[in-house]
Amino acid sequence: MNLDYAFSFFLSRNETPNSRITAYTKAPLFPEHIADIRLATSKTSGTKRRRFIAEMSLKYCKGQPRLTETVFGWSREAVKTGLGEERTGIICIGSQSSHCGNKRWEEKHPKMAKFLCGLAEEHGQQDPTFQSACAFTRLTASSACKALKKVGYPDDDIPALSTMSEVLNRLGYRLRKIVKAKPQKKIKETDAIFDNVHSKDQEAQESELNVKRVSMDCKATVKIGKSSRGGQTRGDNRASDHDFSSEGSYTPCGIVDEDSGQLYINIGSSYKTSDFIIDTLFFWWDSLLVSEQQNIDKIQLKIDNGPESSGIRTQFLKRIVEFSDAIEKPIQLLYYPPYHSKYNPIERCWGILELHWNGTLLSSVNVMMRWAKTMLWKGLHPIVQLSKKVYQKGISLTKKTMREIEKRLKRNPKLPKWDIYIKSIAAI
């Protein structure tokens, strides 16, 4: 029973603070006195501390170790030792360190400890099919003690349950949730898709036609406001205490020319949709010189398999055909497999952009655009524009409409969703 509990016990008997302490002690004792005595005790150690404890026990607690423990919170064994020293005059030298140097259980019983480790390893086995996040059996201190007894180890050498828990923790077998291993996510076409992308790249580079190779993707949405973005700065470095944005959010969509390294960024203020992606393509095309447009024979567009631009997204396919008709150029769509979009060249540009504006408070979209314009990719500054157009989500086409669109598409028979050739209207 600690001191606070003793006070609450006495209060339950409707006694005053003075009487409740006096009832169990020889002299009146107030809480502030007890605090001072405990503070004085903490300043001493060894024989002096036990002597002081004995004197306070005799003065206030009639020399009763249990009452002294209740009032002052000292160890009952320390009080008994101090009272014995005071009564007999014999000093217990080294009583504080009587157990110092005592070996731990696993050091005393190395064979049992080795057996225990093997037992823990067996019980910590994970489901090899990775279908469950749990181990087959969870080894507890109780089951460990039972296993040692079952093998035939003497009861006197087997530790108590509380000690067994400490032993298992010290040996590195603390109870914890089994984390499911995450193998690399692949689909059966993953290797074939990469081989196809590499072969088409090689064909484009060796072709006599002028093939414009570009990579395209949308960056993660960027929150505008005085939020911390990491990095360091010598200027205003006070961000908001929470990263809740009240200034809105914007989505950069980028296109990078794989041959020249020129980057084009269209910052959208609305939803990331198929229409937004195709409008970014129009922005890129309009940014090219007329002579450069005329010199292009074919466009090879690398893109990831996102929901807004996949090879089965009806609105995207409709708009990409319209884009091909508008520029009168054929387009080769090459998709990267799921979970492997990081191999898309545009992703490296987004990493450089994040490093460029980290440490900056993107307090407004104008600040965001200024920093985007000053980044460098292969020695070139990007061409940046802000789109304020509002896009509608969830647009899809009927099967009848899609049949007409599919006539314009030439899908790879082995990879129909990952390699699509869009015929130019001029060639029809």
Image (cartoon, grey):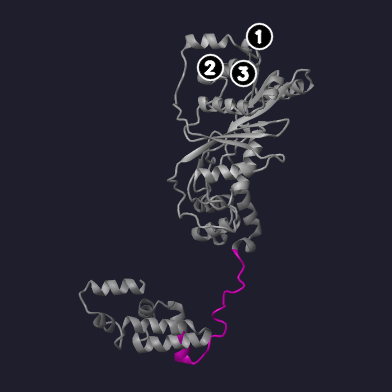
In the image, residue 264 lies in the stretch drawn in magenta = no
Query: In the picture provided, is 182 more to the left or to the right than 74?
Result: right
The magenta segment is: 82-104
Q: Is residue 204 above or below residue 115?
A: above
Give how far apart the Cα atoms at labels 1 and 2 are.
18 Å
Residue at screen point 47% across, 30% down: 389
Which image quarter: residue 87? bottom left
Q: Which of 192/423 is in front?
A: 423
Give how far apart the Cα atoms at labels 3 and 1 are.
12 Å
10 Å crowding of disc 2: few (<14), some (14-19), many (20+)? many
Q: Which residue is mark 1?
A: 427
Q: Which residue is mark 2?
A: 318
Placement of the N terminus among the 4 image quadrants: bottom left
Dot 3 or dot 1: first in sequence order is 3
Amino acid found under the numbered disc labelled 3: Ile
In the rendered image, is residue 276 in sight?
yes
Contact between labelled residues 3 and 2, with CB atoms less than 8 Å apart: no
Contact between labelled residues 2 and 1, with CB atoms less than 8 Å apart: no
Amino acid found under the numbered disc labelled 2: Lys
In the image, residue 96 lies in the stretch drawn in magenta = yes
Q: Position of residue 313 (x, y in %)?
A: 53, 20
Q: Which of 1/267 is in front?
A: 267
Residue at screen point 45% across, 52% down: 242
Q: Which residue is mark 3?
A: 327
